[in-house]
Amino acid sequence: MLKILIADDHAIVRRGLRNLLQEAFPAAEITEATDAEELVQKAMLQTWSVVITDLAMPGRSGLESIQQLKQLHPRMPVLVLSMYPEEQYAIRVLRSGASGYLNKESAPDELVNAVHRVLAGKKYITASIAEKMASSLGQDTDKPLHEQLSDREFEVLKLLAAGKAVSDIAQMFHLSVTTISTYRSRILTKMNMKSNADLTQYAIANGLI
C-alpha cells in the first residue's frame, strides 16, 4: 500500500494536500504531521512511500529534519513543498538528501507529477534549478556570499536579516543564546560584514527576505 506522510504546520494546507493526493492516489494511506518534531517521530515508527514536508515549521530546522529523515530511512523519498522561492533553497534541500523541491505556488498537477517521479526513484527539479546546478559547476569563486554558509548559518542569516533577536532564534531552534551568537559571529566573518543591518541590506538585495 502507498503510504504518504504530509508535514505542514497549517491545517488548511494539510487539508488541501490530502484532498489533492487522495484524488490522485485513491488507495493511498495518508497521514499528517503538524511540525518537525512530529514528522521525525512518525518517521521513526515506520517507513513511508514518500514524505511531503514544508521547510519552515516550528521546532527543528527544516534542513536538519530532512537530514535526520534520510539517516533513518536513506532510500525514503522526501519531497519539499515550501513557500520559499526555489532559487533560495532548492539546491540546499537536494544536497541535504531530499528528492525534490516545489514552491507552494506550483500547479496541483506539478505536485502529482513530482510525487510520481520520486516514487519511481528519480529526482524532481525544475528546469531553472537544473540550469543553476549546471552553471554552478566550476564557478565556486563566483558564488554569492550566502552560498558559502552552512545550512544552519544560512537559516540564522535569514532570521537575523528579518529582524529576529538572537534569543528568539535560540528558542526556535532549541539552542542556547551562546550557540546562536556563535553562528552570528561566523556569518559576519564569512560574509565580511559588521552588523545585522548589513545582513538585512544584503538579504534584501539578494532576494532572501
Image (cartoon, rainbow, N blue to C red):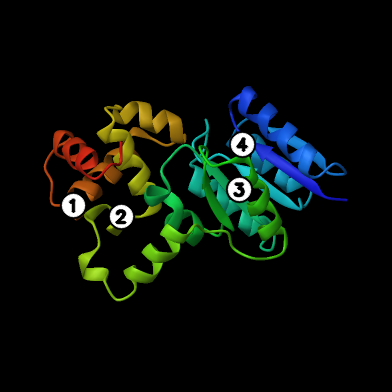
Quarter-of-image position of residue 147: bottom left
Q: Amino acid at mark 4?
A: Glu
**What is the crowding at mark 4: few (fewer than 14 residues within 10 Å), some, or many (at least 20)?**
some
The residue at the far bottom in this view is: 138
Q: Which residue is mark 4?
A: 37
Q: Which residue is mark 1?
A: 191
Foreground: disc 2 or disc 3: 3
Q: Which residue is mark 2?
A: 149
Task: State which tag comes first along the sequence, 1 or 3.
Answer: 3
Q: Amino acid at mark 1?
A: Met
Disc 4 versus disc 1: distance between alpha carbons? 31 Å
- Vertical placement of residue 140 versus 119, above or below: below
- Identified at 37% across, 63% down, the residue is 132
As helix, strand or loop, the secondary structure at mark 2 comes to loop
- Identified at 63% across, 53% down, the residue is 114
Q: Amino acid at mark 2?
A: Leu
As helix, strand or loop, the secondary structure at mark 1 comes to loop
Task: State which tag comes first along the sequence, 4 or 1.
Answer: 4
- Vertical placement of residue 12 versus 176, above or below: above
Disc 4 versus disc 2: distance between alpha carbons? 25 Å
Disc 1 versus disc 3: distance between alpha carbons? 36 Å
Q: Which residue is mark 3?
A: 110
Residue contact between numbered discs 2 and 3, judged by CB atoms under 8 Å: no
Task: State which tag comes first along the sequence, 1 or 2.
Answer: 2
In this picture, residue 108 sits left or right of residue 45: left
Disc 1 versus disc 2: distance between alpha carbons? 9 Å
Residue contact between numbered discs 1 and 2, judged by CB atoms under 8 Å: yes
